Image (spheres, rainbow, N blue to C red):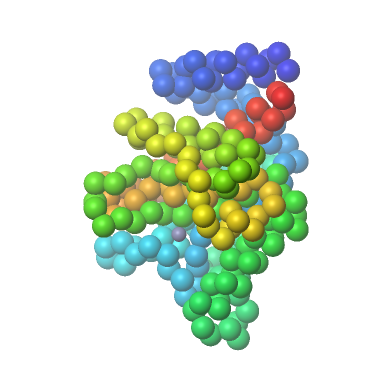
Amino acid sequence: MVLGTAILLLWTGTEHLFGFFHRQSVQALSFALVDRVVVVDPGHGGVDPGAVGQNNVLEKDLVLAVGKKLALLLRQGGAKVVLSREGDYDLADPEITGLYQRKRQDLARRVALANNLQADAFVSIHINSFPSPSQCGAQTFARHGSPESQALARCIQEELNLLAPNSRRVPLPGDYYLLRHSRVPTVIVEIGFITNPQEYRLLQDPLYQSKLAWGLYAGLVKYFALRVQN
Ligand SMILES: [Zn+2]
């Protein structure tokens, strides 16, 4: 893996200066994706809109767009990708009417999907909201006590930070159902704040959605490439 090591060094040494070389490094390391099982989980769906922005812009729609773009990139790289949802629905049974009960079953099924597939990575995509509009940037959450989850979160966080040069965000431990119940390397990624005026605009822009998908993809490539090295 001499070539891989050299490319990883190039990656870490040049990513801020030479976007072109960074992109080349990601593509050169994409061999590490081949046959990896990745569950891409666009959060919410159906009766659950997630965070709601101005003019009824909904988290569930934005994360689905990014999730589909990520799935496409991963499939092109040779990964076996399963999307938890491909439209505006949740995974609960139709006859369940209570919102709380629907949410419980929906989340349990998303986790079961990743666990049953013994996925190599489980990436749940969300959008943040906060009372103060100044909060911005992507934030990853990892499972406390899971080195795999933390490594995955770190790789993705580093890549998404490149989209916001002033972001110093680092992965945080998250006490969320998905992280507590998953038995595979799992990360929850809040890809931006719907309450920040600039990100509110960007998150609706298909080009920026592609950049976010690329950041998630590059983080996954790096995570798997590092695993091949060790
Ligand atoms: Zn969410």
Image quarter of residue 226: top right
Which residue: 68% across, 55% down? 114
Q: Quadrant of residue 27?
A: top right
Quarter of the N terminus within the rendering: top right
Image point (54%, 65%), residue name: 87
Give whichever of 167, 194 is nearer the camera: 167
Q: Quadrant of residue 225?
A: top right
Quadrant of the displayed image that contains ligand 1: bottom left
The residue positioned 40% from the left and 37% from the top of the image is 169
Q: Is residue 98 above or below residue 174?
A: below
* Relative to 86, residue 173 above or below: above
Place of residue 19 in the rendered image (x, y in percent of width and height, measured from the top left): 44, 23
- Image: 9 above or below 228: above
Q: Position of residue 204 (x, y in %)?
A: 36, 53
Residue depicted at 50% across the width and 65% down the height:
44
The one nearer the camera, 95 or 83, is: 95
Q: Is residue 57 visible?
A: yes
The count of marks equals 0
Q: Position of residue 66 (x, y in %)?
A: 48, 50
The C terminus, quarter of image: top right
Q: Is residue 69 visible?
A: no
Along the viewing direction, whichever of 38 and 175 lies nearer the viewer? 175
